[in-house]
């Protein structure tokens, strides 16, 4: 008992000494003083994470942020030429001329390129997404040859867009004449079986409609839409098929017990459960569609059809950069940026309530 009392008294004495030393310590003295060099080293170590992201930030600043700011500033320089750097003053004349198609340089028409881009995008993206969903459902139920079909369907995604477009165009072309006999592509051969005369799908005599000053080359639209759907399927199938693997199988078992049809299972279980991935594909598909260029050049050549009748928004920008009228290119790029942002915002609003996050 006396030993315990002695231990307690000794502990209390040690605690009193510690408190006394703490009370006598000068204000602000938190321990041993660090040298300036040690403080700098510790500060750098605490911020070491920035060292890893600095290269990415530099690249983004040079290749993303600076071009956006430069495009915004230069779009307001009237008569601006990237070759000389000279301009005639500040204003919105570039935007007015671009919208009116009154650039005076004989280049692509903004409204024509915008209509082409919007029509091609808003037809090909939803159709390809729906087809990808149906094919993914079919692949999900085919176990034996699943990997083989995945490989075959993914091949177009690995092929160069220009080369693939040029080869794809031969399916539709009227190639020429030999011994007074037209040499046509496989599509016209199939149409010939049904008594349809060969159509110049991608050439200079391709049929079109005129709506005011706009040209609607419907045959070229069909070729481009078919190509865009075919080339866009592989990536969408990969995303949707992978998403389906994570769906809880109990939902399907319950639907089977209730006698639900395959169509009901698709639209009431599968589609809602993978809605985040579908929304992602729609957003990225629309953004990609608004920037399409290589495929159209591969199909119709550098002038994107006859006098840019199949011109896209990116083709419009490249055209005026080549002509040296970069003020119009900057104005067009800024309007394209705003259009993409508006479309993306609307799409997010429409799909937000339908999206289920697991």
Image (spheres, rainbow, N blue to C red):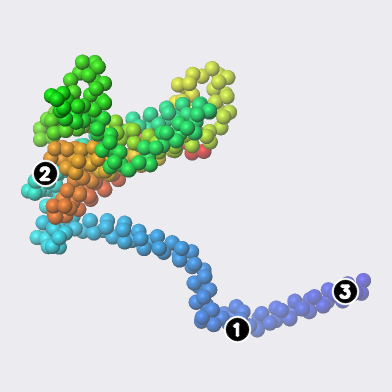
Tell me if residue 356 comes above or below residue 90 in the rendering.
Answer: above
Q: Which residue is mark 2?
A: 101
In the figure, is residue 104 to the left or right of 255? left
Mark sitting earlier along the chain (2/3): 3
Q: Which residue is mark 1?
A: 26
Q: Residue at x 53, y 28 (%)?
A: 143
The mark tally for this picture is 3
Image spot of residue 117 (x, y percent): 23, 38
Q: CA distance from mark 2 to mark 3?
A: 100 Å
Proximity of marks 1 and 3: CB atoms separated by less than 8 Å: no
Q: Residue furthest left?
A: 104
Label 1: state its secondary structure. Answer: loop
Q: Which residue is mark 3?
A: 5
Tell me if residue 355 comes above or below residue 267 in the rendering.
Answer: below
Residue 316 marker = none
Q: Nearer the viewer, residue 347 or 321?
A: 321
Image spot of residue 240 (x, y percent): 45, 35
Q: Nearer the viewer, residue 32 or 2?
A: 32
């Amino acid at each position: 008992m006396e030993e315990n009392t002695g231990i307690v008294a000794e502990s209390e004495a040690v605690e009193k000494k510690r408190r006394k030393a703490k009370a006598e310590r000068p204000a602000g003295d938190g321990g041993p003083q660090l040298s300036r060099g040690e403080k700098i080293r510790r500060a750098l170590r605490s911020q070491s994470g920035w060292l890893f992201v600095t290269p990415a930030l530099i690249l983004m600043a040079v290749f993303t942020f600076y071009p956006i700011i430069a495009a915004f500033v230069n779009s307001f320089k009237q008569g601006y030429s990237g070759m000389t750097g000279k301009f005639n003053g500040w204003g919105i004349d570039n935007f007015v001329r671009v919208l009116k198609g009154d650039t005076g340089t004989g280049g692509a028409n903004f409204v024509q390129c915008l209509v082409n881009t919007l029509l091609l995008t808003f037809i090909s993206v939803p159709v390809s997404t729906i087809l990808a969903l149906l094919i993914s459902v079919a692949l999900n139920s085919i176990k034996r040859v699943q990997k083989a079909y995945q490989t075959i369907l993914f091949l177009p995604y690995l092929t160069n867009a220009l080369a693939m477009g040029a080869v794809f165009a031969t399916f539709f072309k009227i190639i020429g004449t030999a011994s007074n006999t037209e040499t046509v592509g496989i599509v016209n051969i199939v149409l010939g079986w049904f008594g349809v005369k060969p159509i110049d799908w991608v050439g200079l005599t391709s049929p079109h409609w005129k709506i005011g000053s706009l040209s609607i080359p419907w045959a070229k639209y069909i070729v481009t839409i078919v190509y865009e759907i075919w080339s866009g399927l592989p990536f969408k199938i990969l995303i949707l098929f992978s998403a389906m693997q994570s769906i809880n199988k109990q939902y399907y078992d319950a639907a089977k017990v209730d006698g639900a049809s395959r169509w009901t299972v698709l639209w009431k279980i599968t589609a809602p459960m993978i809605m985040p991935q579908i929304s992602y594909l729609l957003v990225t598909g629309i953004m990609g569609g608004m920037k399409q260029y290589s495929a159209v050049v591969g199909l119709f050549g550098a002038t994107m059809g006859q006098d840019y009748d199949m011109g896209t928004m990116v083709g419009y920008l490249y055209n005026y950069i080549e002509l040296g009228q970069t003020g119009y290119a900057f104005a067009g790029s800024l309007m394209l940026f705003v259009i993409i942002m508006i479309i993306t915002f609307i799409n997010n609003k429409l799909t937000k309530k339908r999206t289920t996050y697991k």
